[in-house]
Image (spheres, helix red, strand yellow):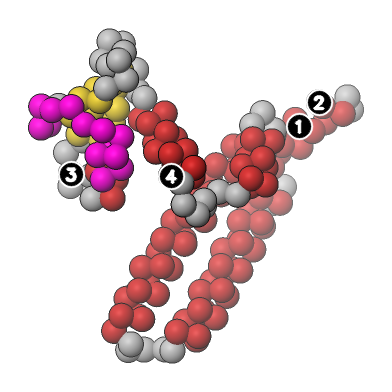
Amino acid sequence: MNKLRVIKKYPNRRLYDTEISSYITVEDVRQLILDGLDFEVRDAKTGDDLTRQVLLQIIAEHEQSGEPVLTTPMLSQIIRLYGDSMQGFMGNYLERSMQLFMDQQAQFRQQFGGMLGPSPWTMMNQLAERNMEVWKDMQSQFLNPSNPQTNKDEETQKRRSGK
């Protein structure tokens, strides 16, 4: 298990890696992510957690160059969800979807690299079927009347409509 690495962000926007006692760049922080190291970015003066800000900065810089991952319509939809009753559900959904995608990608690479087991087409069909199962499961959980999130969403909708 990795020790949590602390990076301090100073008012001059410089990042200081306390583990190596040296200033680093945002690209160095990206490399920490690629290396699978756990870290957090803290404001050097207040101690506030700035990790999400730095991660969003890395994403923004990479979205500007090359082939973007996040399309304009997708970003617009995400922005529309802020303040919506679905906001809490969507973060969890995106996180689970990304983990499922990463798991499937690892499985695909493992099977494709060894060329043992099912053909790549068979495996892709299996992955698609599993995606559908996960999606149906998430839908049923969300639409289940006993789900606290669903009840909360219904109450929010009733308040908004004035009923």
Q: Residues within 10 Å of mark 1 (few under 14, many from 20)?
A: some
- Could you say which disc has been placed on residue 2 in the image? 3
Name the residue nearer the viewer: 123 or 157: 123
Q: Nearer the viewer, mark 4 or mark 2?
A: 4
Q: Residue at label 2?
A: 159
Check if mark 3's residue and mark 4's residue have beta carbons within 8 Å.
no
Magenta region: 19-31
- Could you say which disc has been placed on residue 155 in the image? 1
Check if mark 2's residue and mark 1's residue have beta carbons within 8 Å.
yes
Q: Amino acid at mark 1?
A: Glu
Q: Position of residue 95 (x, y in %)?
A: 49, 48
Q: Is residue 132 above or below residue 60?
A: below
Q: Nearer the viewer, mark 1 or mark 4?
A: 4
Quadrant (top left, top right, bottom left, bottom right) of the C terminus = top right
Q: Nearer the viewer, mark 3 or mark 4?
A: 4
Instruction: Report if residue 65 is visible in the image.
Output: yes
Q: Is residue 10 magenta?
A: no
Determine the CA span between mark 3 and mark 1.
43 Å
